[in-house]
Image (cartoon, rainbow, N blue to C red):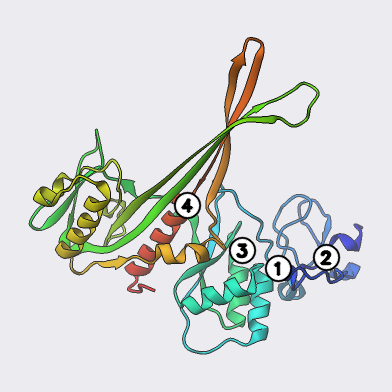
Amino acid sequence: MSREDEFAEPNAHETAGATAAPRRFAPEELVACERCLRANAPTRLNCLYCGAPLPATAEGDKLRRPTLKKLEEWEHGFNVVLLPRGERELTAEAVADATSLLRLDTERLVEIIDARRALPLARASSAVEAELIVKRLGALGLAAEVFADEELARPPARVRALTFEADALVCWPGVGGGPWRVAWAGVLLLVKGRVVTKRVEVEERREKLRGRGETVEMREIASDEAVLDVYAASESEEGCFRVMADGFDYSCLGEAKRLLARENFVTLVETLRARAPSATLDEEYAASRALLAAAWPPAEHTESLGLRRERPGRFNTEAATVVTNEAQFTRYSRLRRRLALRGSFR
């Protein structure tokens, strides 16, 4: 049987930096994996060795804890979203237990709770793990719900132009794409935000006997672009589209069109609100970015740019690191849509 010290229960004050001694489990408390037959701590949801789901036991249900490993952007996740709660205050013990469960900083968790809005708490790797979090939070007095990435991660189709008709909004997705119409009375939600992208390109010179390269040149490019997601009161994807401020054709504004994209974007939002008076405008994304980052941090990836010839016989390596909040905004926007379709805008 494996050593018991391999199965340490997660520290209740992990986020605060405490170093309590790991708990050890008796042999009869360990759970055998049905695939590889290895023994695992009863706190685990998946086998430590082969990753298979572990069988549930009555005693294990009380001890199981979510792993909450950091997921890559391409991985399919399950998002645990805190729902708005009433005026009933939580005890300090309940907040401490929730902090330990979610591996969040206490101050950040309190901020999320006090915001009294639907905000993400965690992005789990499996539905079982997400439901476990929801169950444990419910016992502490916090209502939460699971939304899969299938619902939240797909960005709306980007449109290049709009046409305003008397009774409908006509959307043009681009070259080769046919238009679709959304009745003004059917426009449900407008979600406004900004997509910020930072790209850092690094050129390094590597010597044969050196493990690390010498930085030759570093270039940084940043962009900050306004974005508006428009949703109709329908489950159809044809009722979901995105307007990016740059590269959009503002001819639909007619005489109100100006020279600068930022001015035209503001006018466009005002025009859509005037023509679709039943639509709700959500402008809370900018104020919520810090709270969203707890579960949905900005996506970051590094890509190789290959070799660059410095002089005959010497080549430098180039790589670019890109950090963007576009996926974060998409999840926020899609979450607002799901809530709006059920009649809740918080």
Residue sitting at the far front? 216
| Residue 20 in the image, given as x and y percentages of width and height | 84, 72
Of the numbered discs 2 and 1, the one sitting upstream in the chain is 2
As measured in the structure, the alpha-carbon distance from the residue carrying label 4 to the one carrying label 2 is 35 Å
Which of label 2 and label 3 is nearer to you? 2
Secondary element under disc 4, as helix, strand or loop, is loop
Q: Which residue is mark 4?
A: 325
Q: Which residue is mark 3?
A: 128
The amino acid type of the residue labelled 4 equals Asn
As measured in the structure, the alpha-carbon distance from the residue carrying label 4 to the one carrying label 1 is 25 Å
Q: Which residue is mark 1?
A: 15
Of the numbered discs 2 and 3, the one sitting upstream in the chain is 2
| Residue 243 in the image, given as x and y percentages of width and height | 29, 49
Of the numbered discs 3 and 4, the one sitting upstream in the chain is 3
As measured in the structure, the alpha-carbon distance from the residue carrying label 2 to the one carrying label 1 is 16 Å
**Disc 2 packing (10 Å; few <14; some 14–19; many ≥20):** some
Q: Which residue is mark 2?
A: 8
Please determine whether, in this image, residue 238 is positioned above or below residue 132: above
The amino acid type of the residue labelled 1 equals Thr
260 sits left or right of 147 in the view: left
233 sits left or right of 287 in the view: left
Secondary element under disc 1, as helix, strand or loop, is helix
As measured in the structure, the alpha-carbon distance from the residue carrying label 2 to the one carrying label 3 is 21 Å
